[in-house]
Amino acid sequence: MRANRAYRLIVHREGREPAFLAAEDRLDRIEVVAVADNEILLLWDLPPREASHLARALRADLAGLSEMEFLERWQGADAEGEDG
């Protein structure tokens, strides 16, 4: 089964402006949620430009990969960069 059938991508923007006009201190939240139980599997709080790029990459992988391939690729990616 394709990942986009098992997982849902939710993007919360802190403001209405597009990423290229957003304030530098704004953080957007990206969540990957399991459709079956509404459990949040992956979570990022990123500046708007990074969030925009990440959301685009996640959408492409959700459409092109299986459930397991998607999780293998992105598992742990939400923790990168938190300690430093």
Image (cartoon, helix red, strand yellow):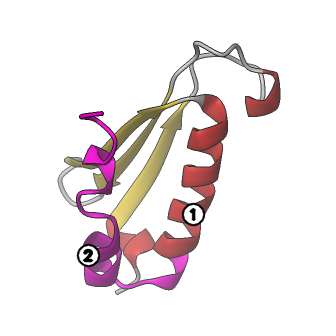
Name the side, left or right, on which 31 lies relative to 60: left
Residue closest to the far right: 21
- Name the N-terminal-most of marks 1 and 2: 1
| Residue for point 35% across, 62% down | 7
Residues drawn in magenta: 63-84
Asked if the stretch drawn in magenta spans residue 64, the answer is yes
Label 2 secondary element? helix
How far across and down, in percent of the image, does residue 8 sit? 41, 56
Is 16 positioned to the left or the right of 39 in the image? Answer: right
Q: Residues within 10 Å of mark 1 (few under 14, many from 20)?
A: few
For disc 2, the marked residue is: 72
Q: Position of residue 69 (x, y in %)?
A: 32, 83
Q: CA distance from mark 1 to mark 2?
A: 15 Å
Against 51, residue 23 (above or below) is: above
List the residue tagged with mark 1.
57
Q: Is residue 67 magenta?
A: yes
